[in-house]
Each structure stands twice: as C-alpha cells, then as structure tokens.
Image (cartoon, rainbow, N blue to C red):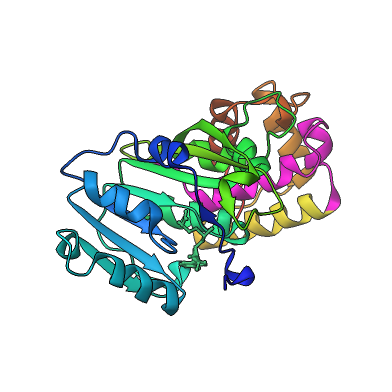
C-alpha cells in the first residue's frame, strides 16, 4: 500500500515523535513536509497554533484530511497538495520534516533560502547525511555540505533513529537533527562561497596551494578575473599571471599549506574575502 518511490516509511515510535515535537510553542505555525498518514501531524496539532502540511501523495493527503475532519484540529490544519520542492512556502516558525532521503540536500537549501528566517527546523535524515551536516573540522565526514550549511545555521544531532521505528523499515539508519538559522544571515554570497569550497574540497586533505594549482581551476579563475575586470573597468596588469596572483594571495594570509579538512568557517570566510579584495571571484 505504501509508495516506495515517495519514500513512504511511517514513523511508529511515539518516543521518537516526542523528541521531534520538543520545543514547540503554543503560538507556533509549523510547516510539516511529508505528513504521510499524519501520525506526527496530530501530535503537532496538539501543541502548535497552526500546521501547514505539504504532501505529494493525494491518497495520503486525503487520508490525513479525513483523520482531522470533525475534530477540533480541523481548522488548525491546512494541507497543501504537491511537491515540496516546487511549492511556494507560506510563513512558518518551525519546520518538521521526514521526507525521502533523495531530496535531503535540496530540501535543506530551500529552507535556508526561505525568508523570513524560521526559528527551528527538526529534520529526519539518513544517518550519514545527518553526520555530514554536523561535522566539524577534522571529522572524517567534514565536507562542502557541512560548511555551506553551517555558514547559515547552527546544526545539532538530536537522536539516532533505528530502522525498526518505521513501517515498513527503510534500508538505512536515520537521525534527527535540529537546525537553527543564524539571524540575520551572514552577508556572504552563497554562490561565491560554494564556488570556493568546490575547489578546496575536491581533495580536502591536500594543501590549498595544491588544489589551486590545478590547471582547470586556474583557467576558471583567470576567466572570472578578466570578466570581472572588464565589467568594473579595472586595468589588467601587463605582467598578469593568474598562478602567481593566486599563490601570492594564499601566501599573503599564510594559508598555502592549510588543508580544507582542518579549516573552520572563519578560515573559509577570510580566504574568500581576501580573494574578492583582489578581484578574484568564484562565480
Ligand atoms: N511524516 C510521516 C511519518 O513520519 O510517519 C511520513 C514520512 S514518509 C518517510 C515520507 C512522506 O513524504 C510520504 O508521505 C510521502 O508521500 C511524502 N513525500 C515524498 N516526497 C515528497 C515531496 N517531494 N514533497 C512532499 N511530500 C513528499
């Protein structure tokens, strides 16, 4: 009866549900992504002012509607039928999600781009994805995703959730994480920042100098530099050489021998700022 393509694994353990709802206020508008049959939804409805639930499967949406019809919850629940990734989101204070793990990454970035900023997100993910989100410098799973997300939010591991808490059980272990956006968001161009991370995380254990010396990287940066200079009427030096310039910048802030695997958010921000001051851009 459940649709495997839509990742329909229903949460059965009320203790896990309790952990997910913790921290809701009576004044909260909650966005729930993928409510399914509504086991979590009816619990959230008891605590929050209003729930907007986005469900893609019309059959389940109808089942959930039937479940609240004629109860006091009926007027607190608004069901939106459709794909979360294509839905224009309403205002919400808190978002709760247990969706198919294929959309984990786009879901996180869609939430982080939403304005106004929400207060908290409680999200169920495949264990490894969750561990990537919370990874710190030096951790094995520390990656581009960790840094991009931690630029905008504080992320914590809430609990491990084993397969047997779901029916039918999925193939992978899960974890719940809490994500609290930084407010106001840092004034950083997300595309630029990601462009920089792409370069240094290709081989995160190699030095920055080694990663920046790659011909494809230097060609791209030279292209961007020339485009930037012509758009901003900046004269290009007659002895311009992209490799000399890039390696010189790394030297100037003493970062040539640093490795992305051990660098923290401030290191990456400093690196981006220094490059940008020298008119080197990553988009
Ligand atoms: N939240 C319920 C629970 O914990 O028992 C059900 C979770 S089940 C893992 C995932 C739910 O997300 C299913 O109801 C599925 O139909 C729905 N879904 C899958 N992809 C979706 C999408 N792109 N947008 C909205 N809902 C989606």
When the figure is inspected, residue 78 is found, relative to residue 13, above or below; the finding is: below
Q: Name the side, left or right, on which 112 lies relative to 254.
A: left
The image quarter containing residue 9 is: bottom right
Q: Up-down: is 174 above or below 250?
A: below
Where residue 59 appears, as percent x and y from the top left, is 43, 78
Q: Which residues are magenta?
A: 187-215
Number of on-image labels:
0
Residue 39 shown in magenta: no
Picture coordinates of residue 141 (x, y %)?
Answer: 71, 34
**Screen quadrant of the C terminus:** bottom right
Choose between 136 and 37: the one closer to the eye: 37
Residue 31, quarter of picture:
bottom left
The residue at the far bottom in this view is 58
Which sits in the foreground, 98 or 45? 45
Left or right of 265, for residue 48: left
Q: Is residue 89 visible?
A: yes
Q: Position of residue 144 (x, y in %)?
A: 65, 42
């Amino acid at each position: 009866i459940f649709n495997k393509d839509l990742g329909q694994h229903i949460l059965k353990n009320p203790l896990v549900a309790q952990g997910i709802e913790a921290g809701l206020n009576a004044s909260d508008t909650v966005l729930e992504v993928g409510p399914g049959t509504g086991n979590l939804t009816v619990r959230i409805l008891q605590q929050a002012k209003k729930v907007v639930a986005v469900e893609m499967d019309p059959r389940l949406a109808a089942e959930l509607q039937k479940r609240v019809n004629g109860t006091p919850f009926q007027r607190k629940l608004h069901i939106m039928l459709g794909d979360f990734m294509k839905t224009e989101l309403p205002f919400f204070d808190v978002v709760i999600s247990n969706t198919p793990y294929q959309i984990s990454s786009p879901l996180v970035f869609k939430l982080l781009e939403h304005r106004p900023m929400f207060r908290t997100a409680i999200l169920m993910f495949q264990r490894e994805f969750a561990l990537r989100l919370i990874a710190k410098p030096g951790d094995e799973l520390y990656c581009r995703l960790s840094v991009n997300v931690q630029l905008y939010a504080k992320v914590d591991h809430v609990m491990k959730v084993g397969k047997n808490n779901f029916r039918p059980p999925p193939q992978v272990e899960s974890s719940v994480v809490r994500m609290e956006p930084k407010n106001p968001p840092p004034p950083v161009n997300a595309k630029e920042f990601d462009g920089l991370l792409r370069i240094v995380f290709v081989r995160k254990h190699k030095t920055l100098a080694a990663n920046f010396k790659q011909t494809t990287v230097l060609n791209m940066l030279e292209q961007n530099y020339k485009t930037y200079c012509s758009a901003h009427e900046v004269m290009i030096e007659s002895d311009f050489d992209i490799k000399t310039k890039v390696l010189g910048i790394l030297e100037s802030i003493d970062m040539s021998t640093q490795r992305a695997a051990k660098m923290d958010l401030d290191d990456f921000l400093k690196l981006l700022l220094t490059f940008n001051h020298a008119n080197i851009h990553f988009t």
